[in-house]
Amino acid sequence: MIVYRYADAVLFDAEIKNAKNDRNGAVTALNKIAKRAYGVDSFYSNTLTASEIDALILKERMKEFAAEGKLWWDYIRFDVVFEKNPFLVGRENEQNILLWPVAQASINRNPNLNQTPGYDK
């Protein structure tokens, strides 16, 4: 059974709204989290830029889901994995480390499939 918490849904909502240039909607979603966590109605301002909102969403996700294994996927989704993960700094040319290899059995069954770059060596 897959279980998502309310905070996960609200933060995904903020992320989607921010990506669609709905800054006010994104901040409203962030403020739902802040109201529950900090007891403040308007913790975040409606004057934030898209990149500031993204940074705040990541910060809230780090707090909400500490040690739950979600941060790696957040970093990939926000395209900051190579700057935020200290083990990957300077390895931007190794994009294959973000992807899984295609199973050799699948490639054998379907010759139209190609191996993920970086795993084909």
Image: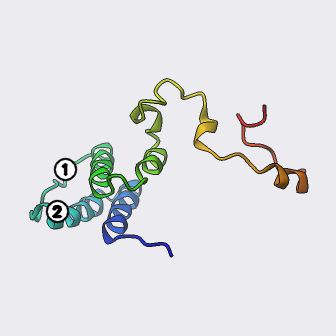
Q: How is the image coloured?
A: rainbow
Task: Specify the quadrant that holds the C terminus.
Answer: top right
| Residue appearing at x 60%, y 35% in the figure | 95
Comes first in the chain, label 2 or label 1: 2
Question: Which residue is denoted by mark 1 in the rendering?
Answer: 47
Q: Farthest residue toward the bottom? A: 1
| Residue appearing at x 32%, y 53% in the figure | 66
Closer to us: 24 or 6? 6
Q: Position of residue 64 (x, y in %)?
A: 28, 58
Closer to us: 65 or 34? 65
Q: Quadrant of residue 8?
A: bottom left
Q: Residues within 10 Å of mark 2 (few under 14, many from 20)?
A: few
Element on which disc 1 rests: loop
Q: Position of residue 65 (x, y in %)?
A: 33, 57
| Residue appearing at x 41%, y 30% in the figure | 86
Q: Position of residue 33 (x, y in %)?
A: 22, 64
Q: Residues within 10 Å of mark 1 (few under 14, many from 20)?
A: few
Contact check, label 2 and label 1, Cβ < 8 Å: no
| Residue appearing at x 81%, y 45% in the figure | 114
Q: Given the image, on which type of amino acid does mark 1 rest?
A: Thr
Element on which disc 2 rests: helix
Measured along the vertical axis of the image, is residue 116 above or below residue 26? above
Question: Which residue is denoted by mark 2 in the rendering?
Answer: 37
Measured along the vertical axis of the image, is residue 70 above or below residue 41? above
Name the disc covering residue 3, or none: none
Q: Given the image, on which type of amino acid does mark 2 rest?
A: Ala
Q: CA distance from mark 2 to mark 1?
A: 21 Å
Instruction: Tell me if 28 is positioned left or right of 89 in this view.
Output: left
Instruction: Tell me if 4 is positioned left or right of 97 in this view.
Output: left
Give the mark toward the camera: 2 or 1. Answer: 2
Q: Quadrant of residue 51?
A: top left
Q: Quadrant of residue 116?
A: top right
